[in-house]
Amino acid sequence: MKIIETKFAESFYESLVRGVTGISPDVLQLMEEALAEEKSPPARAMLEAMLKNVQLAQKLRKGVCQSPGIPCIYVRCGPELAGIDVRKITGESIIRATREGYLRPSIVHPLTRKNTGDNSGPGIPNFEIELDPGLDYLEAIVSFKGCGPELFNTFKTFTPESLGKNFAGFKRFLLETVINAGGKPCPPIGLGIGIGGQMDGAAKLSRKAISTRKWNDRHPDPELNLLEQDLKDKINQLGIGPGGVGGQTTALTVKIGIAYTHTAICPVAINFHCWVARRFGFKVYADGTMEEIL
Amino acid sequence: MKRPVHLSTPLATESIRNLKVHDIVTLSGTIYTARDMAHLKLKELKKSRKPMPEVFRGAVIFHAGPVVKKEGSGFTLLTIGPTTSIRMEPHSDLMGKLGVKASVGKGGMGNESLQAFKKYGMVYLLAAPGCGVLHAQAVKEVKQVHWLEELGMPEAIWVLEVTDWGPLTVAMDSHGNSLFHTIYEEGLKKLDSLIKD
């Protein structure tokens, strides 16, 4: 296990540096497509600046955005690999990348506001681990986004009545939330929507949907896939645009995660993601083989 | 895109009054970073009539927290980009009183700021969000830092020398106009046609 741990730690650090000095290839592709379609000159100028920044970051090997937010790590683990201390390894890599200048030390005590200086602290990184007896590997997906978008995350518990016909109540709530956020969450945004469970469940689903899926994938449930497309189209008619300067490019994607819920309620959580999606992931097998998945 | 207006610090009120929403600006000279904690600390100093760390007459405030590396006796700036300006909304009047002429950030500010911009002759400049490396290219020198130990890297006041920084968009001017307000109103108008209850 020690050998695998060492190898995992090395690969993790390398992936982390590569991950934060660029944006995910699927998101880059969506940005380029958006620029090809966008007609508004100020919006085009904004998208061009963003793409130029990505090129510069890769060329100069610098953090693509100064804001690493709160790092989020999603792990799924089979029984053979349950002995790897993923939390410790990933936390140490984040501290190392902070010391090397790839990440800004942004983590503070929530009340005293004292900065820990190295992105460490209780509850950091945001870490979810799921044990799955059916897996013969460990999978880790890591996501960095700016923290500005977090200011606009929101939650509402609908009732069957307020959910409305064709979910009109939910759709109105979502669009109002996006209009109020305007240019503030660094559009073009990705939007994660968690539906179902209870408050905490919906909130976790909303973050996970936008943090772990490729932004150009399709929801496996055809109805939810249609809903994702419909919501994205509606958001892009609001005219907010990249950086909030107006234009048709407001959302690059909408991702929905659902869980079943109680007959009395429909909890909905909305999680904003900036365009600077720094995401990477890989699998580790018991024989030490590593495989990149994102 | 419009031809940029080039401005140098300290900024004169007259040149700020000439700017209108949608104008494009490039900036050279000294700028100061300030986020939530620096604004709160400046407010405390003003309230208790203690001396300010800098003279902010004609100043440019950048809502930003950089990534900086200590090298020898000085600092090297690696990346810097705008943070969400609306958090600084309660402090625009104080900024005006201190003589600040431009705030640079992302996402825009609200009505209180718009009033302050009118009263004191100030503007809000939008910097491309998420572009930490791009903006860092304009920073030629880290001149000084205030309150680094106490507030930490993002929240300290970094005094930076910039050359031809931009393009920055005038998104709120000193005549009561805000690009963001217009876009917000248009979005609300669109809402009903998008939702068929």
Image: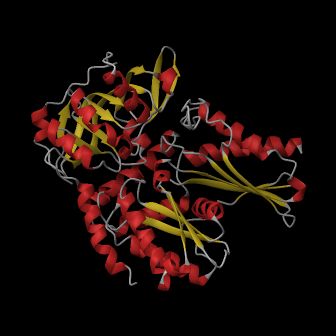
Point 65% across, 66% down: residue: A198
- If the image is split into quadrants, where does the N terminus of chain B sit? bottom left
Report the side of A285 relative to B100 (left or right).
Answer: right
Q: Residue at x 45, y 21 (%)?
A: B147
In this image, B22 relative to A15: left or right? left
Residue B67 position, x and y percent, is: 49, 33
Q: Nearer the viewer, residue A36 or B166?
A: B166
Figure label count: 0
Q: Residue at x 86, y 67 (%)?
A: A134
Q: Of residues A36 and A90, which is closer to you in this image?
A: A90
Q: Position of residue A294 (x, y in %)?
A: 64, 59
Locate residue A258: give its quadrant. bottom right
The quadrant where residue A293 appears:
bottom right
| Image coordinates for residue A220, horizontal then vertical, percent | 64, 78
Against A38, is B101 above or below?
A: above
Left or right of B8 in this view: A134: right
Relative to residue B44, is residue B20 depicted above or below?
below
Residue A200 visible? The answer is yes
Q: Position of residue A34 (x, y in %)?
A: 40, 66
Residue A250 visible from this viewpoint: no
Q: How is the image coloured?
A: secondary structure
In what quadrant of the picture does the C terminus of chain B appear?
bottom left
* Identity of the residue furthest to the top in this view: B73
